Amino acid sequence: MSLTNPFGDLQVTDPQAMRALAHPVRLAILSFLQRNGPATATVLSPHVGATPSVTSWHLRHLAGFGLVTDADPEEVPGDRRQRWWKAKARGFSVTAGEDPESQVAARALGEQLAAAAQQQVTTWITDVGPGLPARWQRVVGVSNTNVPLTPDELEELSRRIDELIAPYVHRAEADAPDGARIVRILRHYLPGADDLRPTPGEES
């Protein structure tokens, strides 16, 4: 794994790492650490639906793939006699190879990520969104747009969106202006099953 995108996210390419992440408790652990900073297995336990001992086992499993690591002493907000963990990066992206093992592993992880994203959206709609101030209500929500694109155009569009978001991602929370909140941005690029028109030279 490497830090290769504008956000400094981990680029997950190893099928074994994908399979390690394709577990609801591990995804919940990683999400909590990315969003809230260092935590112990005991702190994580009620948030991920597992006992502290089971949570500790999952943390060690994630650490084996470089997804989490021990927090530095100066990052620990509590009892330093306990083992504090942190996410290796604040996010990750998945790139699957063309081999069958990578494709199967990426699909399994994608299914778990989709389920987690759906739960996050549902929770936001029912519990968070209705309580937001009017100013936030006017700018947040869920959109669904169909756009005709080629693979090259989609790649360019994704790159440009990354470049727009990156300065905000890298800004320290202490430097954020008054009124700022953590905003979760979920992006899904879902090409249709068929081309709009046959590719030249491929007509039947």
Image: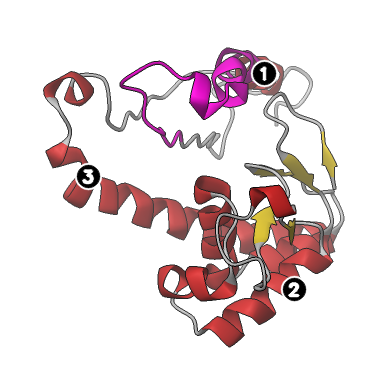
Marks 3 and 1, the one that precedes in the sequence = 3
Question: Split into 4 quadrants, where in the image is the C terminus?
Answer: top right
Which residue position is annotated with label 3?
128
Three-letter amino acid code at the position of disc 1: Arg
Give how far across and how far down residue 184 sits, in percent. 43, 37
Which residue position is annotated with label 2?
61
Secondary structure under tag 2 reads helix
Find the distance from the CA under tag 3 to the CA under tag 1: 30 Å
**Point 74% across, 73% down: residue:** 60
Q: Which mark is residue 159?
A: 1
Q: Is residue 149 above or below residue 70?
A: above
Left or right of residue 163, residue 65 in this image: right
Which residues lie in the magenta part? 159-185
Q: Are marks 2 and 1 in contact (CB under 8 Å)?
A: no
Q: Is residue 163 above or below residue 122?
A: above
Q: Which mark is residue 119?
A: none
**Point 62% across, 23% down: residue:** 170
Task: Tell whether position 173 is magenta.
Answer: yes
